[in-house]
Image (tube, rainbow, N blue to C red):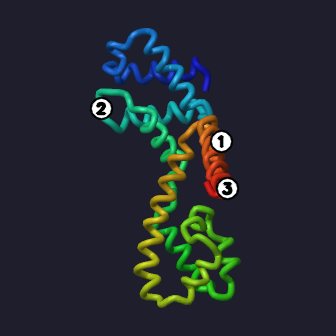
Amino acid sequence: MTMDEARNIIALMELYYPDTWRNLSDEAYAAYVRQWREFFADDDPRLVEAAVKACIISTTERYAPNVGQIKERMRRLTTPDEMSEAEAWGLVKNALRNGYYGYKEEYAKLPQVVQRCVGSATQLREWAVMDTGEVDSVIASNFMRSYRAIAKSEAEWAKLPSGFREEMRRLTGQVFGRLELDAGTGR
């Protein structure tokens, strides 16, 4: 997104949320535009504008939506058929039918987010040999809770601009690298 595109979207919001900018200095407004451009750097400006318009149409707030609200609206606009936790569990249940002998193949067929919740092909096999009542209650409940958490985490990660994601990967890599080094030296 360019600075001009960011200014145009903010100008649209100014029409519908004038209280947001009422007492904002020129410097603060310019900083707001720069930050807006940075937060939406990787996003298609048409999608950002569509998300802003969706917020304008669907809310009665006096103040402009924040970046997180716009990012969430963009996600919902681009993934309207997002899988529910019950649908994800349904895929696992189907995989369990052939999970004893064909557990590797069944695991490979699952979407990546579902694979993360299951953990491994071996886990799928272990569930396949368990009592059906326990699988349908305890395992299902734990899986769905895990699915909600992982889906939420992935959605939040996807909202971040790529520069932020790369910086986080770099920083967490440094932290994990130091932990491994410390563990290896016994310190």
In the rendered image, residue 82, in percent from the top left (x then y), is placed at 51, 57
Q: Which mark is residue 150?
A: none
Of callouts 3 and 1, the N-terminal one: 1
**Relative to the observer, which residue lies in front, 22 or 178?**
178
What distance separates the C-alpha of mark 2 from that of mark 3?
56 Å
Q: Amino acid at mark 1?
A: Arg
Give the residue displayed 66% in from the left and 81% down from the top: 103
For disc 1, the neighbor class at 10 Å (few under 14, some 14 to 19, many from 20) is: few
Give the residue displayed 50% in from the left and 47% down from the top: 156
In front of the other: label 2 or label 3? Answer: 3
In the rendered image, residue 110, in percent from the top left (x then y), is placed at 62, 69
Q: Amino acid at mark 3?
A: Thr
**Relative to the observer, which residue lies in front, 132 or 79?**
132
Q: Which mark is residue 61?
A: 2
- Image height of 148 relative to 135, above or below: above
In front of the other: label 1 or label 2? Answer: 1
Q: Quadrant of the N terminus?
A: top right
For disc 3, the neighbor class at 10 Å (few under 14, some 14 to 19, many from 20) is: few
- Image height of 18 relative to 103, above or below: above
Which type of secondary structure does the marked residue at label 3 adopt? helix
In front of the other: label 3 or label 1? Answer: 3
For disc 2, the neighbor class at 10 Å (few under 14, some 14 to 19, many from 20) is: few
**Residue of label 1:** 170
Which type of secondary structure does the marked residue at label 1 adopt? helix
**Residue of label 3:** 185
Q: Amino acid at mark 2?
A: Glu
- Image height of 53 relative to 187, above or below: above
Q: Quadrant of the C terminus?
A: bottom right
Q: Are marks 2 and 3 in contact (CB under 8 Å)?
A: no
What distance separates the C-alpha of mark 3 from that of mark 1?
23 Å
Of callouts 2 and 3, the N-terminal one: 2
- Image height of 166 relative to 108, above or below: above
